[in-house]
Image (spheres, helix red, strand yellow):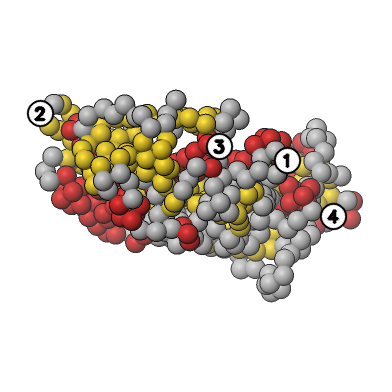
């Protein structure tokens, strides 16, 4: 690399150095990420504003099926190709690994260098936090308070170029809210932490999140424990979404192929009820992730992995797609610029197309339980085919709430739950999970008995 190269020349010189060795049977992928974020935090000690920026480069080197990865900041970028060349000799061959070619529709003109993103708007972040506080007070009717909260707004620019001809750049944005709320009553005090992410600041579900936060603290304080017998079960979209997120790794390339085949008797049986369709879509309405391309620069689109209860495809990156003999689904995810991409989700969800109103679902329940929220992380063991949900919610009698439930355990065989879903709502909602967004509408499972 040229001595004294400016920071904006780094990417071009890395790419040129990689292309110079292409005739030796060596391929390479050059990646750059630049990001900026602003966070406003408020708690009992006051208010703080933090701005952060990042810039990093990464190289993946391909030689005879072997892959090596190296990453560094601008000051160390010049040595990345040398580090990768030293490491590739020690790596294992991986079938399907190669530098990505362009895809139809990619621009033929030179790509504009990645620009420095702008941090978020402090005024907007403060307004969002103030609005959430107001919603919490209103929903909790004075019995719930926000003790600490933060809103982060960010923007990220990325570029991927390969010696095989791919050269693309894109920009994405993100917003998040993290808060701790406290509820008090004569019986004691209960606190809960809530998290929400969105692709745009205006898409943060502040009112819905506030109502959820209030339930998180008031139901354990005012409800009664429920010994779940055989009852009609309604899983709120928040609860079901966390469960759905734990299913995603089943469809990551060929990693869980043997387990998925075992669950379906080599594909002869469905994995879920006929009305369940699972998809991954970076442009799903309400999804917290919205990017045009994945971490390898592959365009992203809707990809169905389970259709009407039957597995039909997998989420793939370029290498796993090559092994399967299909195009990549665009699911190579980079959790940071300093890590190589791995298969992951964008917005992974149960399609609500067959759904009905949640009120219609409720009206059909003679005696049951509505699991409104999780009290702790769900315990899901996909390999052992088991799940356990610690939840709170409401008892249901003849289509109406009959009382608050402070705690209940819903558990059993995961395959039984999926195959016994009899109806879904039309209220698709997303939560953060599985490295992206996971979502579900309300799910109805009749006559469920926990074990």
Give the SS element for disc 1: loop
Q: Which residue is drawn at the image coordinates 16% and 47% (left, top)?
A: 137
Q: Nearer the viewer, mark 1 or mark 2?
A: 1
Q: Residues within 10 Å of mark 1 (few under 14, many from 20)?
A: few
Q: Dot 3: within a 10 Å radius of its alpha carbon, few (fewer than 14), some, or many (20 or more) residues?
A: some
Label 2 to label 3: alpha-carbon separation: 42 Å
Specify whether 72 is left or right of 353. right
Mark nearest the camera among 2 and 4 is 2
Find the distance from the CA under tag 3 to the CA under tag 1: 15 Å
* Front residue of this view, candidates 304 and 334: 304
Which residue is under mark 1? 266
Query: Is 63 rendered above or below residue 206?
Result: above
Tell me if I can see residue 370 in this picture: yes
Q: Residue 405: which disc?
A: none
Question: Who comes first in sequence, dot 2 or dot 3?
Answer: 2
Residue matched to label 3: 415
Please state which of the two labelled residues, at mark 1 or mark 4, is closer to the viewer. Answer: 1
- SS for callout 4: helix
Residue position marked by numbered label 4 in the rendering: 22
Q: In this view of the protein, which residue sits in the foreground, 327 or 310?
A: 310
| Picture disc at residue 186 | 2
Provide the secondary structure element on which disc 3 rests.
helix
Mark 1 or mark 2: whose residue is earlier in sequence? 2
Horizontal and vertical percent position of residue 344: 59, 46
Q: How many marks?
A: 4
């Amino acid at each position: 690399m040229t001595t004294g190269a400016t920071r904006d020349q780094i990417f071009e010189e890395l790419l040129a150095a990689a292309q110079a060795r292409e005739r030796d049977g060596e391929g390479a992928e050059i990646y750059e990420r630049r990001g900026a974020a602003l966070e406003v935090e408020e708690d009992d000690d006051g208010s703080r504003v933090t701005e952060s920026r990042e810039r990093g480069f990464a190289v993946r080197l391909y030689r005879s099926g072997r892959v090596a990865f190296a990453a560094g900041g601008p000051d160390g970028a010049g040595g990345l190709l040398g580090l990768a060349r030293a490491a590739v000799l020690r790596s294992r061959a991986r079938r399907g690994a190669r530098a990505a070619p362009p895809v139809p529709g990619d621009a033929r003109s030179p790509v504009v260098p990645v620009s420095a993103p702008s941090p978020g708007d402090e005024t907007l972040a403060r307004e969002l936090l103030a609005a959430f506080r107001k919603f919490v007070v209103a929903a909790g009717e004075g019995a719930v308070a926000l003790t600490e909260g933060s809103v982060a707004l960010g923007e990220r620019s990325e570029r991927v170029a390969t010696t095989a001809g791919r050269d693309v750049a894109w920009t994405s944005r993100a917003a998040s809210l993290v808060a701790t709320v406290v509820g008090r009553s004569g019986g004691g005090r209960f606190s809960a932490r809530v998290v929400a992410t969105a692709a745009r600041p205006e898409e943060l579900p502040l009112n819905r999140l506030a109502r959820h936060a209030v339930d998180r603290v008031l139901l354990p304080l005012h409800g009664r424990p429920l010994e779940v017998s055989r009852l009609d079960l309604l899983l709120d979209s928040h609860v079901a979404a966390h469960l759905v997120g734990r299913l995603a790794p089943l469809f990551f390339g060929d990693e869980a192929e043997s387990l998925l085949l075992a669950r379906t008797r080599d594909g002869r049986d469905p994995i879920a009820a006929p009305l369940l369709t699972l998809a991954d879509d970076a442009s799903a309405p309400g999804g917290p992730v919205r990017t045009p391309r994945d971490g390898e620069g592959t365009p992203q689109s809707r990809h169905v992995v389970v259709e009407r209860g039957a597995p039909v495809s997998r989420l793939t990156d370029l290498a796993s797609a090559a092994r399967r003999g299909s195009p990549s689904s665009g699911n190579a995810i980079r959790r940071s610029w300093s890590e190589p991409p791995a298969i992951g989700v964008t917005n992974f969800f149960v399609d609500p197309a067959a759904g009905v109103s949640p009120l219609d679902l409720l009206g059909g329940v003679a005696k049951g339980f509505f699991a409104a929220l999780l009290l702790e992380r769900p315990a899901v063991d996909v390999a052992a085919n088991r799940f356990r949900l610690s939840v709170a919610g409401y008892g249901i009698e003849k289509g109406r709430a009959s009382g608050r439930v402070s705690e209940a355990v819903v558990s059993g065989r995961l395959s039984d739950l999926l195959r016994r879903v009899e109806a879904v709502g039309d209220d698709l909602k997303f939560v953060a999970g599985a490295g992206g967004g996971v979502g579900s509408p309300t799910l109805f499972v009749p006559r469920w008995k926990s074990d």
